[in-house]
């Protein structure tokens, strides 16, 4: 079980599956207006790139940040500090790619949730699924690759 909304503490307790569904619904609702603005023609042009990018990026970033880095830092510093440090690194990695600071801060906050769901589930799979869906939404909305 995980605690919502702050993973380790909070007023509500929910399962990993329900948390993941809520997260995906919230992300979809947040990006839906931008996806609609991009239009069907945009999606028709980029669908293959969207799938390749989304799978590759989610897989590799989660293997690096939640697989390797989170597990190593957890051994040395404990889970909470490992989540914080890898989340900051996750945001900084995106800054090094030229993404604006405000977005990188949002990515760091997202990294806390990715790390938390990884720690509480004992698996990277929920974070990979969430990351994959979010990549699809961000590419479809034009925020990535546009």
Image (cartoon, rainbow, N blue to C red):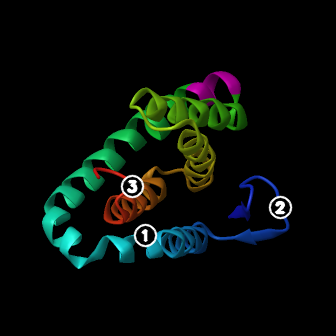
Q: Quadrant for the N terminus, please.
A: bottom right
Q: Residue furthest right?
A: 11
Relative to 74, residue 33 above or below: below
Q: On the picture, is 22 further left or further right than 32?
A: right
Q: Residue furthest top?
A: 76
Instruction: Give the residue displayed 62% in from the left and 53% down from the top.
Output: 120
Q: Which contiguous range is marked in magenta?
A: 73-77
Q: Residues within 10 Å of mark 1 (few under 14, many from 20)?
A: some
Residue with the mark numbered 3? 143
Q: Which residue is mark 1?
A: 34
Disc 2 crowd rating (10 Å Cα; few below 14, some 14-19, many 20+) is few
Which of the 4 quarters of the picture holds residue 30? bottom right
Name which residue lies at 73% across and 62% down: 5
Q: Is residue 19 above or below residue 123?
A: below
Q: Secondary structure at mark 3?
A: loop
Q: Nearer the viewer, mark 1 or mark 2?
A: 1
Q: Is residue 90 above or below residue 106?
A: above
Q: CA distance from mark 1 to mark 2?
A: 31 Å
Tag 3–tag 1 contact (CB < 8 Å): yes
Give the labeled residue for mark 2. Answer: 10
Out of 47 and 22, give the one closest to the viewer.
47
Q: Earlier in the sequence, mark 2 or mark 3?
A: 2
Label 3 – label 1 distance at C-alpha? 9 Å
6 vs 104, left or right, is right
Q: Position of residue 28 (x, y in %)?
A: 48, 73
Residue at 39% over, 55% down:
143
Alpha-carbon span between mark 2 and mark 3: 31 Å
- Relative to 79, say whether 137 is above or below: below
């Amino acid at each position: 079980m995980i605690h919502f909304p702050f993973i380790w503490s909070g007023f509500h307790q929910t399962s990993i599956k329900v948390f993941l569904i809520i997260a995906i619904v919230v992300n979809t609702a947040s990006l839906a207006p931008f996806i609609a603005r991009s239009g069907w023609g945009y999606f028709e042009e980029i669908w293959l790139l969207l799938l390749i990018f989304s799978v590759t990026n989610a897989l590799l970033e989660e293997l690096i940040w939640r697989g390797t880095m989170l597990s190593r830092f957890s051994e040395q510093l404990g889970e909470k500090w490992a989540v914080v440090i890898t989340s900051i690194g996750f945001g900084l990695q995106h800054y090094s790619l030229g993404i604006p600071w405000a977005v990188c801060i949002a990515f760091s906050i997202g990294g806390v949730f990715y790390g938390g769901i990884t720690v509480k589930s004992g698996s990277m799979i929920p974070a990979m699924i969430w990351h994959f869906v979010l990549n699809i939404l961000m590419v479809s909305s034009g925020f990535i690759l546009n």
